[in-house]
Image (cartoon, rainbow, N blue to C red):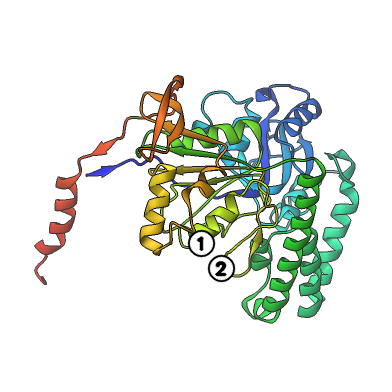
């Protein structure tokens, strides 16, 4: 049998998104006001929209007027979060429908489609550039895209690489986007320079983060949530993150937990286990006043610029500490538990009924849920067990019935 676990399948995050909707179904039937409502909610770095009211279908009949809104975000975002916010946060975020969203590896393709300046849309009505409503000079952008397409057809590898390196350094393109644009041979030529640029950009981001935190007398807030699997630890953390910030990051595999980190301000270290970090690295990451932290990833270190860090784990903080010292053979006289405890601003224990504030009892080395500091747990979901033994049995046995076994 299989069991639905607490940590749901992580959806790929995106930076370039196009929202499309028929005018009659918009919350505000004035497409420009609707555009402003949406961008004020989801807060993209760049946006551009247009009313398509001259499109024809394959039979030459008019297509119902509809809005196209292209969004480009500074950080990669969850499609469900974007859809949920566009829909004014109706219902649960995890149930948000993303059918009206289209995703682009390169935002320029989305901008070009708004006015049908793409190869696949060249036979459609060519909308005037001035019809587009945007927060940047759209005409200049399309002219730039057109020049670049012509130039890239004639461009030497070195010119293309230099252009992408500049965009990468400025944060206008991600490493994944660069990898999608370059061919294998081009990437091989640029690999060392890409690494150098990424390291330099991380230095710049880290310096900016340190300045912000220091000048504003801020510190990292550390929240530790522990409890059994399936009680809603991760949902509690992501619920807070989605309702208070447009960008957050959830760690991946224990082998490279920060691989996809893009300097989001909220970090969720999900299902923390003793083998994930060394005790020394964990203390550095969680130190509220240590802003000069680079987290290790496979190709280069990244600046940790989080203002809030959630930890979810089946272990209490002390249980985690004890397991780390056992597995890593640490010295408790040097690596004391107090170092970890004083870094945690709030410890929450969660069961299927309640969320408790929890306090450490030094005498028994245990955490005690505070009974008068609890809240009903809205994040618990009964695990779903699927009894599929017969189906799997039939699937395995069926090939044995053929004659050539």
Tell me where residue 133 appears, x and y as whole percent.
Answer: 84, 37
Q: Secondary structure at mark 1?
A: loop
- Image point 62% across, 77% down: which residue? 184
Give 372 or 108, whichever is nearer the viewer.
Answer: 372
Quarter of the image that includes the N terminus: top left
Q: Is residue 347 left or right of residue 51?
A: left
Please give the residue where the numbered disc 2 appears in the rendered image: 298
Relative to 157, say whether 262 is above or below.
above
Q: Is residue 310 left or right of residue 378?
A: right
Q: Secondary structure at mark 2?
A: loop
Relative to 187, say whether 11 is above or below.
above
Q: Is residue 293 visible?
A: yes
Q: Are marks 1 and 2 in contact (CB under 8 Å)?
A: yes
Residue 5 bears which disc, if any?
none
- Image point 69% across, 78% down: which residue? 192
Please give the residue where the numbered disc 1 appears in the rendered image: 256
């Amino acid at each position: 049998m299989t069991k639905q676990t607490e940590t749901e399948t992580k959806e790929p995050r995106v930076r370039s998104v196009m929202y499309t909707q028929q005018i009659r179904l918009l919350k505000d039937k004035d497409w420009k006001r609707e555009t402003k409502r949406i961008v004020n909610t989801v807060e993209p770095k760049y946006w551009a929209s247009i009313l398509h009211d001259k499109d024809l279908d394959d039979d030459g009949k008019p297509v119902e007027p509809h809005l196209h809104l292209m969004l480009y975000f500074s950080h990669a975002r969850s499609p469900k979060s974007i859809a949920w916010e566009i829909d004014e946060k109706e219902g649960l975020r995890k149930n948000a429908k993303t059918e009206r969203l289209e995703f682009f590896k390169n935002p320029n393709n989305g901008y070009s489609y708004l006015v049908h300046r793409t190869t696949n849309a060249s036979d459609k009505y060519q909308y005037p550039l001035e019809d587009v409503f945007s927060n940047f000079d759209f005409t200049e952008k399309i002219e730039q895209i057109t020049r670049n397409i012509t130039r890239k057809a004639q461009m030497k590898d070195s010119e293309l690489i230099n252009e992408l390196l500049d965009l990468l350094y400025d944060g206008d393109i991600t490493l994944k986007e660069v990898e999608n644009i370059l061919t294998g041979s081009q990437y091989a030529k640029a690999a060392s320079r890409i690494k150098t640029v990424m390291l330099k950009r991380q230095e710049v981001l880290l310096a900016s983060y340190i300045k912000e935190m220091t000048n504003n007398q801020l510190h990292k807030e550390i929240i530790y949530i522990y409890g059994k699997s399936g009680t809603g630890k991760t949902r509690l953390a992501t619920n807070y993150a989605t309702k208070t910030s447009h960008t957050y990051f959830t760690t991946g595999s224990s082998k490279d937990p920060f691989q996809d980190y893009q300097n989001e301000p909220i970090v969720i270290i999900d299902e923390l286990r003793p083998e994930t970090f060394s005790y020394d690295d964990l203390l550095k990451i969680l130190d509220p006043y240590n802003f000069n932290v680079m987290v290790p990833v496979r190709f280069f270190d990244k600046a940790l610029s989080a203002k809030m860090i959630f930890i979810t784990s089946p272990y209490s903080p002390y249980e985690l500490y004890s397991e780390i010292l056992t597995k890593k053979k640490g010295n408790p006289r040097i690596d004391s538990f107090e170092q970890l405890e004083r870094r945690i601003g709030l410890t929450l224990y969660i069961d299927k009924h309640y969320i408790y504030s929890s306090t450490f009892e030094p005498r028994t080395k245990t955490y005690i849920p505070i009974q008068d500091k609890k809240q009903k747990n809205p994040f618990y979901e009964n695990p779903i067990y699927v009894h599929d033994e017969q189906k799997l049995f039939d699937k395995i046995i069926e090939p044995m019935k053929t004659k050539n076994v």
